[in-house]
Image (cartoon, grey):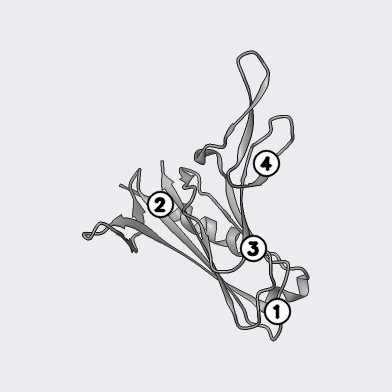
Amino acid sequence: MFNYLPRITRIIPAVIASSLLGAAAQADALTSNFSYRIVQPAADGGEELIERSSVRPGEVIQYRIRHENVSDEGLSGIVVMARVPQGASMTFGAQSTSVPAVFEVQAEMDPEQDGLEWSSLPAMRRVAGADGRMTQEPLPESEVTAVRWVLTEPLPAGESALNTYRVRVN
């Protein structure tokens, strides 16, 4: 078992700072809350989410990001982004959102382009084969560096958006 708390706390500012609004002046209109739980099997065959400050390799962490519109009007252009911590791999299919949004992952998907790219799922990446020709293959979960939700509708006044995703500790 090792203490994963330092890595987790480093991700919190990145999540909050990456909540983008259509206008910078609206930034005070959105409050953010970031939390995490460890996913464990339950006695009934389901799962339970528990609080703990350390994790073991192979365990799954569920991150929850809640944003609330505390203004008197709807907010549009919201993008919620969060990093996948070093030492962990994204778990495809375990993400959720409470509002209409497009979910995307960030990774190196095309070696002929500089930097990282965003893609919706299922994400594909280009790789060079032994003969030097480029082919496409599914993006491995371990290559994802960040996730984001691009809200497709304004977040109404007084309403919240809840986004979750899971990672497995390597």
* Rendered image: mark on residue 17: 3
Query: 75 or 27, which lies in front?
Result: 75
* Rendered image: mark on residue 116: 4
Give, as a three-letter code, the residue at label 3.
Ala
Q: First in sequence, mark 2 or 3: give its number.
A: 2
Mark 1 element type: loop
Which quadrant of the view contains residue 49? bottom left
Give, as a three-letter code, the residue at label 2.
Tyr
Q: Are marks 3 and 1 in contact (CB under 8 Å)?
A: no
Question: Could you classify mark 2 by the number of other residues whose Cα lies within 10 Å: few (under 14), some (14-19), or many (20 or more)?
Answer: some
Q: First in sequence, mark 3 or 1: give its number.
A: 3
Q: What residue sits right under mark 2 in the picture?
A: 4
Residue 18 lies left or right of residue 23; in this view the side is left
Q: Is residue 68 above or below residue 57?
A: below
Quarter placement of the C terminus? top left
Question: How much space separates mark 2 and mark 4, taking CA atoms?
Answer: 26 Å
**Residue at the (65%, 79%) spot, across then down:** 156
Question: Which numbered disc, 4 or 3, marks the residue closer to the eye?
Answer: 4
Give, as a three-letter code, the residue at label 1.
Gly
Q: First in sequence, mark 1 or 4: give its number.
A: 1
Question: How much space separates mark 1 and mark 4, taking CA atoms?
Answer: 31 Å
Q: Position of residue 41 (x, y in %)?
A: 28, 55
Total residue callouts: 4
Q: Position of residue 66 (x, y in %)?
A: 54, 70
Q: Is residue 10 above or below residue 159?
A: above
Q: Are marks 2 and 4 in contact (CB under 8 Å)?
A: no
Question: Which numbered disc, 3 or 1, marks the residue closer to the eye?
Answer: 1
Q: Position of residue 94 (x, y in %)?
A: 46, 54
